[in-house]
Each structure stands twice: as C-alpha cells, then as structure tokens.
C-alpha cells in the first residue's frame, strides 16, 4: 500500500512540473510577442518621425541703417596733356625727365628747325621790302597831292598815286602777318609745359627727328608725343556704380579710398559729378570723385578700392539670401505656421546686401522662415523645427545710425571696415 501511495505522489509531482513548464512557456511566448509588437510600434514611430523634415527657422530683422559698397576705381590726374611738336626738326636738348616737377611755361625741350628759321628770315625780308615800297609810295602820293589843282597833273593821276600808297600799306600788313606766322612757328622750337604739374613720360631723346603734330593728332597720325605732363595737385577718381545706388549719387556724398600698396590708410574723397546715364552693358553709372593730393602720394593711372557708405531704410526687413526660394511662381519663402506646417509665401525683394536681402512685401516680423529650405518642400507639409547651431543664420545686429550726408567741405566720418551689416558688393 505504501508503494502505491509513493507512485501516486510521484505522478502528481510530475504533473505539476509539466504544468509549471507549460505556464513558463506560455509566459515566455507572450512576452516575446509583446516585445516584438512594442519594438515594431517603436520602429514605426521612429520611421514616421524620421520622415518629417527637420528645419531651422529664422525671423526677419530690421535692415541696416547704412549700406556700404566697395568698388574698383581708376585714379586720373586733374589735368593731363600729351605734348607734341608743332614743327618738324631734330631735338636739340631735353631738360625735364620722368617725374620732374614743372611750372606753366617752363622749358621742356628745344628743337632745331633750319627750315622754319629760313622761312622766318624770308618773311622778315619781305616785310622790309614792303615797308620800303610803302614809304616811297607815301612820299610820291604826297608830292602828287601837292600838285593837285594845277595844270601840271590831273586829278586822276593824283588819285592813282594815293591808291597806290594804300595798296603798299596793305602789302606791309600782309608781310607783317607772314612774319607773325613764321614767328609763331619759330616759337614752337621751344617745347614748354602747358600748366603746373609733373612730367609723367618722356618719349624723345637728343637727335630724334620729330614731325609737326599739326593740331589734334589721331591714332593714325604721323606725330608722336614728346612728353606727358599731369597736374596732380588734385585727382579725379572714376567709379562705375551699380544702378541701385544711383539715387544717392548727388552732392554731399563722400567716400574713402584705399590703395593696394597701403590698404590700411583711408583717403577721403568727395563727389564731383556723375554721367546721369546708365551703361546698358554693365548697368552701372560712371561717377567722378575728387581727392586732394597735396603731397603727390596719388599717381595717375593708379587703381583704388572705393568704399561708399550711404543711408538705408531700417524699416525694411531683411533675410539671409539662402532663405529664398525661386520657383515658377516667382520669389517665395517657406514659413512655418503654429501647427508646424509649411506655407509658401510670395515675397517682393529689394536691395541685395551681399549675404542678406531686403523683403519689401509679403513678410511680417514675427513670421518663422525656414532657413536654407529644400526645393522639394510642399505647401502644407509637416516639418519639425530644430534648434540651429549657435551662429547659424545669424544676421547680426543692425549698425548704429549713420550721420546725415555732410556737405562737400565737411570731414568724412570714420567708417568701420568690420561693419557686419554693410554687405559690400564686390
């Protein structure tokens, strides 16, 4: 009997073990199914979240109070004249070389012209003959006039002698003009400076044969210039200014120049005049500035960087250039609404400051604008706004107000070369 009890106890214990194992298997299976479902749901959430584009947004800021443009400029002398020979001959001597300062009328060179000398001598001789004949005609006419009214001479003969004296006087005048003509040519044997300045070139030497310029000499003329003289007490600076700055090209505008050999030095320049016409090829306006040059540090033909700082309207909002979308509808920006959905907004643009651009219409100060948007963004598309990296899309603070444009005689206020808002057009 005890053996039977032991067998029943053994069977019951084995059944409980089997049930326990089955329960454990069911729990493990359920846990595995729950784990897989949870992972699948999480993966779906992550996939859905990853499908939402991440964007970084910026807001429009007030525009700068000044705008700056840096442009190339050409420096020319106040006056510059090529000096040509007005008679043909050989250069006897030159007296001024490159860089020599000269005064108006100062001798630059002399020319030997034997032909001109001979012509002048002949004209002077002809004048002497004409004067002698005139004196004789005057004496003869006086004598005939004394006999007028007598039976010795007729009145017609007296009138002929008087008229002959008048003709001889005209001959004297003609001969005098010939002497003056050849005398003027003889004076051109002395080549002189037309005004105070410096000699910028000497293209002749002793013994060179030179041709008479004969007035204005074109590109095909036979004459070549002997010297060039430039007046550099004040310089002219010619700058081609973009058309969108044309409204500020007027008296009172000032600028600063910097030279490649001394970029740290700023030289003030003053507006003189403008062409009042736009070049259709470059869409620029030729503008002329003036610069005092008392120490002759500026040289004709030099290149300079011309920096102009002009007032701008701070009430016009600006955005980074990379926030713009150019599509078939025109210029747009991508806005993010309160539900984090995209709205494509048409905008009207103004001036380009280099890294930023004016938005004249279509944008409010509080609008969230996607910076550097993808061209594939669609209207109403869901996006996720993320925090940008520090400094990303930062347009800086608007610069301090610029002083009013001073009159031409007023000193130029200092200009900050590191102004972050002065997007210079290069």
Image: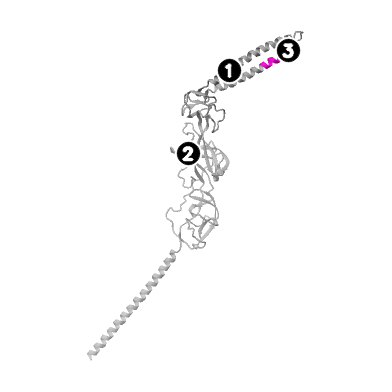
Q: Which residues are magenta?
A: 156-168
Instruction: Tell me whether the residue at label 2 lies in contact with that at label 1, contact meaning CB atoms closer than 8 angstroms.
Output: no
Q: CA distance from mark 2 to mark 1?
A: 56 Å
Q: Which mark is residue 158?
A: 3
Labels 3 and 2: the sequence-earlier one: 3
Q: Earlier in the sequence, mark 3 or mark 1?
A: 1
Specify whether 359 is left or right of 17. right
* Residue at image mark 1: 122
Looking at the image, which is closer to me, 215 or 372?
Answer: 215
Which residue bears the numbered disc 2? Answer: 304
Horizontal arrangement in the rendering, residue 40 relative to residue 190 (left or right):
left
Q: Residues within 10 Å of mark 3 (few under 14, many from 20)?
A: many
Horizontal and vertical percent position of residue 291: 51, 35
> Alpha-carbon neighbours of circle 1 within 10 Å: few (<14), some, or many (≥20)?
some
SS at mark 1 in the image: helix
The Cα atoms of the two marked residues, 3 and 1, are separated by 33 Å
Q: Main secondary structure of the magenta part?
A: helix
Judging from the image, the colouring scheme is: one colour
Residue pictured at 66% horizontal, 18% vertical = 170
Q: Is residue 300 above or below residue 26?
A: above
Q: Position of residue 410 (x, y in %)?
A: 52, 37
Residue furthest to the bottom: 1
């Amino acid at each position: 009997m005890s053996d039977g009890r032991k067998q029943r106890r053994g069977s019951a214990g084995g059944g409980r073990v089997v049930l326990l194992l089955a329960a454990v298997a069911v729990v493990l299976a359920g846990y595995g199914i729950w784990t897989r479902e949870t992972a699948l749901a999480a993966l779906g959430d992550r996939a859905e979240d990853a499908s939402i584009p991440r964007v970084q947004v910026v807001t429009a800021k007030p525009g700068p109070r000044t705008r700056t443009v840096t442009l190339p400029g050409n420096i020319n002398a106040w006056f510059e004249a090529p000096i040509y020979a007005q008679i043909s001959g050989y250069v006897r001597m030159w007296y001024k070389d490159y860089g020599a300062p000269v005064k108006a009328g100062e001798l630059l060179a002399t020319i030997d012209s034997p032909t001109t000398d001979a012509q002048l001598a002949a004209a002077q001789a002809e004048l002497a003959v004409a004067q002698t004949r005139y004196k004789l005609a005057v004496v003869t006419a006086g004598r005939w006039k004394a006999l007028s009214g007598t039976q010795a001479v007729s009145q017609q003969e007296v009138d002929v002698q008087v008229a002959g004296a008048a003709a001889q006087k005209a001959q004297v005048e003609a001969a005098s003009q010939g002497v003056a003509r050849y005398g003027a040519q003889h004076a051109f044997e002395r080549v002189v400076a037309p005004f105070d300045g410096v000699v910028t070139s000497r293209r002749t030497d002793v013994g060179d044969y030179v041709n008479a310029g004969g007035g204005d000499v074109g590109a095909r003329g036979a004459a070549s210039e002997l010297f060039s003289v430039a007046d550099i007490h004040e310089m002219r600076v010619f700058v081609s200014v973009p058309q969108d700055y044309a409204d500020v090209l007027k008296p009172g505008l000032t600028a600063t120049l910097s030279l490649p050999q001394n970029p740290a030095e700023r030289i003030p320049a003053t507006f003189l005049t403008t062409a009042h016409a736009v070049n259709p090829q470059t869409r620029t306006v030729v503008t002329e500035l003036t610069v005092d040059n008392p120490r002759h540090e500026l040289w004709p033909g030099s290149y300079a960087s011309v920096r102009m700082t002009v007032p701008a309207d701070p009430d016009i909002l600006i955005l980074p250039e990379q926030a713009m979308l150019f599509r078939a509808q025109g210029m747009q920006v991508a806005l993010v609404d309160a539900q984090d959905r995209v709205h494509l907004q048409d905008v009207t643009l103004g001036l380009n400051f280099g890294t930023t651009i004016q938005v004249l219409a279509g944008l409010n100060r509080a609008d969230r604008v996607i910076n550097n948007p993808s061209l594939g963004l669609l209207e109403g598309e869901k996006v996720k706004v993320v925090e940008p990296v520090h400094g990303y899309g930062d347009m800086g603070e608007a610069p301090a107000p610029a002083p009013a444009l001073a009159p031409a005689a007023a000193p130029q206020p200092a200009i900050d070369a590191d102004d972050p808002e002065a997007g210079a057009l290069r």
